[in-house]
Amino acid sequence: MHNNLINKYYFINKFDTNLIDKQQKDTIIIYRNYLNSNLSEIINIKYYCKKNNLKFYLSNNIKLAINLSLDGAYIPSFNKSTKHLSYSVKKNFVIIGSAHNYKEIRLKEKQCVKFIFLSSVFKKNKNYLGLNKFKLISKLANKEIIALGGINSKNIKKLNLTSCSGFAGISYFDKKKAPKKGPFK
């Protein structure tokens, strides 16, 4: 399932041009700030990403993402709603979502997401899967899988052992050097 155009998703919780400028043009920016979400900040990120040819998604507010003509929206694992299915969206609008287990994968499929972020592949938290369990669960999905959780420059090559279509994170993209193009290197 690997191709040369892996999907890279960078989660941000504030507007920082220095961090956004380090990203490659094929990295998708996802604004995920559940505590202090600010409309003017979202609009500023939208225009900055547009100026720099970066795609921009909004987390957990599909209606606002549609109204602002963003590139897409991200549905976190705790969001179980399907009311967005009644919304009218433009042709290229992409909805993505995250899951931690098989039950949540099925829910994301019912929510009609394009990609499922499966977490946590490396980060040892309450949702820790590990590489083998990640591979097993991802085979059960009917959507493409994006790896999430604890990905860094030391373990990114291990993603070649999976059938994931890309990866997402925060700290990996905060580093001075942005990820290389092509398969996981």
Image: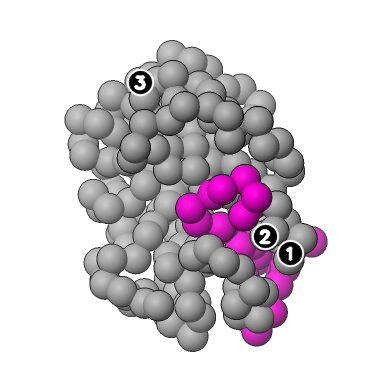
Camera-side residue: 121 or 95?
A: 95
- Residue 119, horizontal then vertical, whole percent: 64, 62
Q: What is the span of residues highlighted in magenta in the rendered image? A: 108-133
The tag on residue 105 is: 2
- Residue type, label 2: Ile
- Which secondary structure lies at badge 3? helix
Question: Which three-letter amino acid code belongs to the residue tagged 1?
Answer: Asn
Mark 1 Cα-neighbour bin, 10 Å: few <14, some 14–19, many ≥20: some
Q: Is residue 79 above or below residue 145?
A: above
Closer to the chain start, of discs 2 and 3, is: 3
Residue 150 or residue 86, whichever sits in front: 86
Q: Which numbered marker is on residue 44?
A: 3
Give, as a three-letter code, the residue at label 3.
Asn
Quick check: is 164 in the magenta stretch?
A: no
Residue with the mark numbered 1: 101
For residue 125, say whether it is visible: no
